[in-house]
Amino acid sequence: MHVGRGIFLQNNGDPDRDAEIVATEFRLAEQAEADGFDSLWAAEHHFDGYHMCPNPAQVLTYLAGRTRRVLLGSMVVVLPWHDPVRLAEDLALVDHLSEGRLVLGVGRGLGRIEFEGFRLEMGESRPRFIEHAEALVQGFETGTMAYDGEYYRQPPVALRPKPRGSLRGRVYAAAVSPASMDIMARLGFGVLVIPQKPWATTEAEVAAYRERFLEINGVEPPRPLLATWTAVHESAAAAQELHSEHIVRYARSIVEHYEFGNEGLAEIPGYEYYGALAKNLKKRGLEEFTHFLAGLQVHGTPDAVTDQLVDYARRIDAAGVIAVLSTFGHQSTAEAMRNQALFASAVLPKLQAIDTHRVLGAAA
């Protein structure tokens, strides 16, 4: 199966450590190609230490010049935060510089701090996402950005350099709510699954998406991609300590950054699902939910991590996995380097030798 490496720059502590976090993560990202990973993935976030990567296209441009083989993906670019024509230009250049290695992951955003920081109406994110996504895909198809929608209007302009090729078959979207799954099927996008629900629920929603995609498009969708935050150690006890120290802390940062306890999200159009989630969490408690999220991620000895990732991938018939291995929670530079080195030597080769029919971009 395909095995990618996620780039994550978390520092919810002292801002003076930001420089160390950035240096460590990019050192490891550049090392990933030599380590044997198949792809690198950069996410987008703004305005706090949850993840300090404001521009995935900038990161992928840098990596295009520092690598030769790995695919370069976004996990994700949040479309409502961007001018589509500027984003299209940036992505077209990344695709040229990397000689066609771009894989585009997109999303509509959930962090209220980010919408407010950009002075954008959060309640407009769903229709803006759809319009921006349609314009972007069409622009790569035709070489011209042109769109006349309710929120996005673009008179025809040429994309130069001319896009190297179509985006179809290499666009994945982060989708959590069932409504979002349906939108991605209609857009013809694959889905990126980040575990946040009981696996039975995730499996059912991915199956419904696959059925809807086939109904609309007449073909099977690309196999999903699975992203997990992963801690591996030769000792099971030490791996459990890494889970408690770093993965649980990362899960707590999710709850805080996205305000999963904020029932007021139900009042924002398009975010009713998260308002209902907040009501349920009020009964269960945020700490219980934090540990539930952490438990969905992966930790253990190399054999245990391999088995768990294979099981997760097969549950949703995924093309492969994206492992986030460093600078989350409160990892030191030494811990981050050790985690990637052990995963690369003891887990990565086993995963790549298993289920070799699972290819990124290929239909089930």
Image: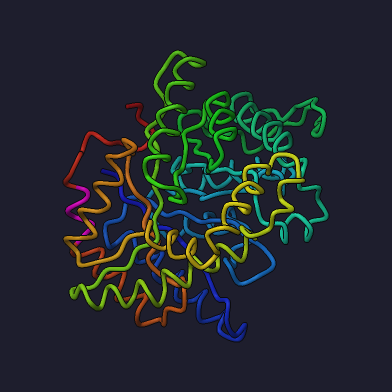
Residue drawn at point x = 16 percent, y = 46 percent:
353
> Residue 58's quadrant in the figure?
bottom right
Q: Position of residue 135 (x, y in %)?
A: 68, 30
User: Residue 246 or 275: which is nearer the viewer?
Assistant: 275
Check residue 251 for magenta coloring. Answer: no
Left or right, 300 with respect to 79, comes to left
User: Residue 190 or 317: which is nearer the viewer?
Assistant: 317
Left or right, 290 with respect to 50, comes to left
> Residue 158's quadrant in the figure?
top right
The quadrant of the image that shows the N terminus is top left
Residues shaded magenta: 347-352
Residue drawn at point x = 34 percent, y = 49 percent:
321
Residue drawn at point x = 60 percent, y = 86 percent:
16
Q: Position of residue 7 (x, y in %)?
A: 46, 62
Q: How many marks?
A: 0
Q: Is 327 above or below relative to 186?
A: below
The quadrant of the image that shows the C terminus is top left
Q: Position of residue 340 (x, y in %)?
A: 31, 68
Q: Position of residue 166 (x, y in %)?
A: 52, 29
Left or right, 252 with respect to 69, comes to right
Q: Is 219 above or below relative to 77?
A: above
Q: Is 148 above or below relative to 100?
A: above
